[in-house]
Image (cartoon, rainbow, N blue to C red):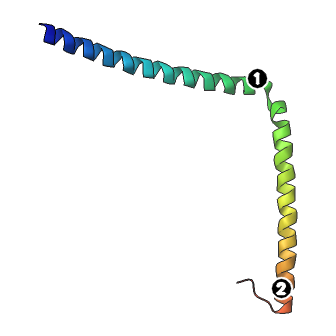
């Protein structure tokens, strides 16, 4: 019957949409894996600038911590409170 054919067409259309969504997800995953592979091929040298930046930030934070620790010690000597 035409009702049965219509239901079948809807089911096929839904399955097609599901398959399209799955294909898109796989394409995105493939793209991410390719990006990761390119980065691995480039090796650690490609990460060097990023590592240097992080080390510089870490050094700056250590200096800030030392300054704050000195300020806290000074306040404690003066009898001040940090609370």
Number of dots carrying numbers: 2
Identify whether 71 is placed above or below 77.
above
Q: Which of marks 1 and 2 is nearer the N terminus?
A: 1
Q: Which of marks 1 and 2 is in front?
A: 2
17 left or right, relative to 12: right
Horizontal arrangement in the rendering, residue 26 relative to residue 16 (left or right): right
As helix, strand or loop, the secondary structure at mark 2 comes to helix
Residue at 25% x, 11% y is 9
Q: Where is residue 32 in the image (x, y as percent from the top left)?
A: 62, 26
Q: In this view, does 20 lie to the left or right of 44?
A: left
> What's the residue at 58%, 21% (across, down)?
30
Callout 2 crowding tier (Cα within 10 Å): few <14, some 14–19, many ≥20: few
Q: Could you say which is closer to the camera, residue 27 or residue 39?
A: 27
Residue 76, compared with residue 32, is above or below; it is: below
Quadrant in the rendering for residue 28 = top right
In the orientation shown, which residue stands out farthest toward the bottom?
A: 79
User: Image height check: is 19 above or below 77?
Assistant: above
**How far from the left and from the top, in percent, is residue 20?**
43, 18
Q: Name the residue under label 1.
A: 41
Q: Where's the N terminus, which quadrant?
A: top left
Q: What's the residue at 87%, 71% (across, down)? A: 67
- Please name the residue that numbered disc 2 is placed on: 75
Corner quadrant of residue 40: top right
In percent of width and height, residue 74 lies at 87, 84
């Amino acid at each position: 019957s035409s009702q049965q054919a219509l239901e079948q067409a809807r089911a096929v259309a839904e399955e097609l949409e599901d398959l399209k969504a799955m294909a898109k997800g796989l394409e995105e995953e493939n793209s991410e894996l390719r990006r990761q592979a390119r980065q691995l091929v480039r090796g650690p040298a490609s990460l060097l600038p990023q590592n240097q930046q992080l080390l510089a930030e870490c050094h700056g934070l250590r200096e800030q911590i030392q300054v704050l620790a000195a300020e806290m010690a000074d306040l404690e000597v003066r009898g001040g409170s940090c609370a």
